[in-house]
Image (cartoon, rainbow, N blue to C red):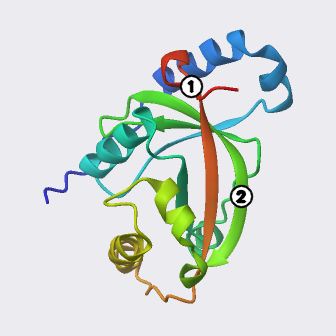
Amino acid sequence: MKTTPAAPIDIDAVRAMWRNYAAAHPTVTRVFDTYEAEQFGDSAEMADDLLALILEGRKRATSSHTPEYRDDGDPFPQIGSHWVSCDGRGEPRAIRRIVELRVAPFMAVDAQFAYDEGEDNRTLESWRREHRRFFDRTCAARGTTFSENDELILERFAVVWPRRFADSP
């Protein structure tokens, strides 16, 4: 698989997308007035592939390695928070809102969560195999090692913008 580094996020385009969303949803954005912008995975290709799953409605969950947040000093996501998902070129394509969140060890992820992540064939077996590869790779790049006992942040989300991709309320 080709692995091209993702381009930097286009902050001006992200701000413009957020302004459009906020104008259409002033009640929601008054309460949740901040957002994060991100790209999925560790390559432009992975960012594009996972974003495509979101836009087609197949992916409504994601997981991240808890130690990465702790090592970087970043706050954990929160229920109700918004994430602007960007493609591998750094362009914003969708806004997601976290609707469910929990922290659990890698091996505690269940078949329903694996299915909701929408990747590969959606089985728990493929989820474990592919996520183990991903976490091994990203931990090695950070100079750490991954353990199946490590905790993950497991989030479910709704796509809220743009309207053509948004989940029903």
Residue position for label 2: 101
Q: Can you say whether 110 is above or below 92 in the image?
A: below
User: Number of callouts in the render?
Assistant: 2
Provide residue 124's location: percent of width, then percent of height: 44, 72
Residue position for label 1: 166
Amino acid type shown at disc 1: Ala
The residue tagged with tag 1: helix, strand or loop? loop
Q: Can you say whether 120 is above or below 130 in the image?
A: above
- Image quarter where the N terminus lies is bottom left
Provide residue 82's location: percent of width, then percent of height: 66, 37
The part of the image, by quadrant, that contains residue 121 is bottom left
Q: Closer to the camera, 123 or 75?
A: 123
Amino acid type shown at disc 2: Leu
Tell me: 154 left or right of 25. Answer: left
Which residue is rendered at x = 41% and y = 74% of the image?
135
Q: Can you say whether 150 is above or below 72 in the image?
A: below
The CA span between labels 2 and 1 is 20 Å
Identify the disc placed on residue 44: none
Which residue is rendered at x = 72% and y = 65% of the image?
102
* Label 2 crowd bin: few (<14), some (14–19), many (20+), radius 10 Å: some
Q: Earlier in the sequence, mark 2 or mark 1?
A: 2
